[in-house]
Image (cartoon, helix red, strand yellow):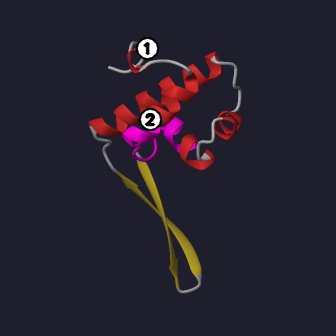
Amino acid sequence: MLFFCYMKEKGKETKKVQNEKPDSTDSDFVKLGKRMRELRIKKGFKSFETFAYDNELPRVLYGNYEKGVGNITYKNLLKVIRALGISLKEFFSEGVD
């Protein structure tokens, strides 16, 4: 994972890049997000924003969940799964190890 840090040095802006190894939790969140995206599209929603709006989910947070960014709470995961109209078992049956 690359992190960019912008610094101002006496009137000029420089970009500093830091490499950081992703840990296993990061990849788990990415898998979870891919699964959410896959099921959303399967349900007929091309846009994550429309899906979030129609199901009263925070649009920006939901977008981050699909990208694997941030830490989804169990409560919000249940909201998403219910909005998808499936069970926990169905959600975790594929795509998430």
Which residue sits at x=69%, y=35%? 54
Q: Amino acid at mark 1?
A: Glu
Mark 2 neighbour density, 10 Å: few (under 14) some (14–19) many (20 or more): some
Q: Quadrant of the N terminus?
A: top left
- Disc sitting over residue 69 in the figure: none
Which residue sits at x=62%, y=45%? 59
Residue 34: give x, y in percent of width and height. 50, 27
Give the magenta range: 63-77
Residue placed under numbered mark 2 in the picture: 77
Looking at the rendered structure, the secondary structure element under dot 1 is helix
Left or right side of 77 for 41 = right
Q: 40 or 15: which is nearer to us?
A: 40
Looking at the rendered structure, the secondary structure element under dot 2 is helix
Residue 38: give x, y in percent of width and height. 56, 21
Residue placed under numbered mark 1 in the picture: 90
Mark 1 neighbour density, 10 Å: few (under 14) some (14–19) many (20 or more): few
Q: Quadrant of residue 18?
A: bottom left
Which residue sits at x=57%, y=28%? 83
Q: Is residue 12 above or below residue 92?
A: below
Left or right side of 52 for 88 = left
Residue 58: give x, y in percent of width and height. 59, 47
Q: 74 or 8: which is nearer to us?
A: 74
Q: 48 or 21: which is nearer to us?
A: 48
Q: Earlier in the sequence, mark 1 or mark 2?
A: 2
Q: Is residue 80 above or below residue 93?
A: below
Q: Is residue 11 magenta?
A: no
Give the alpha-carbon distance from disc 1 to disc 2, as whole Å: 13 Å
Q: Amino acid at mark 2?
A: Leu
Q: Is residue 95 above or below residue 76?
A: above
